[in-house]
Amino acid sequence: MSLAARFVARFVAVVAVVAFSNLVLLGCSSDPPEPDPTSNATTNTGTPGGTASPTATPRTRLPPDAAPTRDDVLRAGTAVTSGPVTVVALVDGTAVEQADGSARLALPAGAGEVVATLAAPDGLAIDALIDDTALVRADEGAQPPVAGIRLTGNGRLVPVGDVVQVVGSAEPQELWLATTAVESADWGEREGGRSLAVSPAAWARGGGSAASTLLGEQLVALEPEAASDTMQQQLTCHEVGAPDKETWNLEPWRPAVGLLAMAAARCNPEP
């Protein structure tokens, strides 16, 4: 499938593009899922010649009604821990730590049904985003996120009062919590000049707004030069169009051309 087609699917909420499916191939193995008509997905965005920056749009929080309270979840739920960050899920099961430090918790099937309820301990807040990923922040506010959450299936994350409900899908899925989006970033000489080889964590390769935000934040924290327009656009291009590539090579000397032109150039626009 073409890189451009991936961009259209992922950025349908923010980029009005048609007839862009015949651009160069990057060898992606499968089509992206159809967008949920009730949920507008967002991720890193940019305009031609403009800046690509992480976009994490929160869902509107619904009134509590009959949802379990935060205290209920914290008292009886299952802890899911990645690094220093723990969230709690009111569902039977045990979270399994992964080799990269992330954690996965199996959730039952249940299309349209609430299959789990999430809450954050004191000092943390779960910010559910409109593409059914979530960021974990140090309390509510503008602080950089400390972790991200995504589902491995087609479930939804719906904020209700001070908890987040997981609406299930027809098939079982997993809740995946991670604190690391960028495993490493190493400078070298490639492609005719300086190049930053970024190794994303498996969790971040799954895409979504939470992954985009953590990738951008953590990469700039590791390598401040990655904050430039062109480096951010190349990062987004690889995230969307070549998520399974072993390393994402970003070159500071390439021009910032906007995401669509970046896709047409296979993430490698020439000066």
Image (cartoon, rainbow, N blue to C red):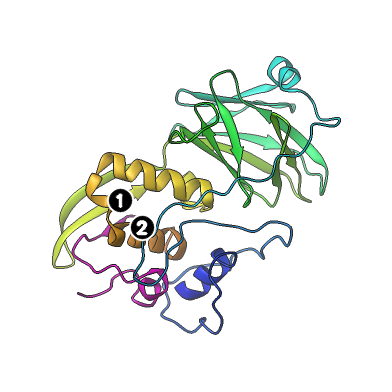
Q: Is residue 111 magenta?
A: no
Residue 81 at x, y = what percent?
A: 54, 25
The answer to which image quadrant residue 125 occupies is top right
Assess disc 1: are there few (<14), some (14-19) or many (≥20) residues with their C-alpha within 10 Å of its C-alpha: many
Residue 143 position by quadrant: top left
Pick the residue in front: 44 or 28: 44
Q: Examine the rendered structure and indicate whether residue 193 appears above or below residue 137.
A: below
Q: Position of residue 54 (x, y in %)?
A: 44, 51
Q: Which residues are magenta?
A: 245-271
Which one is in front in this view, the residue at disc 1 or the one at disc 2? Answer: 2
Q: Residue at x 43, y 43 (%)?
A: 214
As measured in the structure, the alpha-carbon distance from the residue carrying label 1 to the one carrying label 2 is 9 Å
Queried whether the magenta region covers residue 258, the answer comes back as yes
Which residue occupies 51% across, 67% down? 29
The residue labelled by disc 1 is 198
Badge 2 crowding class, 10 Å Cα cut-off, few under 14, some 14 to 19, many 20 or more, is: many
Which amino acid lies under the numbered mark 1 shown in the image of this protein? Answer: Val
61 or 166: nearer the viewer: 61
Point out which mark residue 42 bears: none
**Which of the marked residues, 1 or 2, is nearer the chain's N terminus?**
1
For badge 2, the amino acid type reads Leu
Q: Is residue 7 left or right of residue 167?
A: left
Q: Which residue is depicted at the point 27% across and 73% down?
A: 269
Mark 1 falls on what kind of element? Answer: strand
Q: Is residue 254 above or below residue 140?
A: below
Quadrant where the C terminus sits is bottom left
Q: Which residue is mark 2?
A: 235
Q: Is residue 201 visible?
A: no
Residue 91 percent coordinates (x, y): 74, 28
Residue furthest to the top in view is: 75
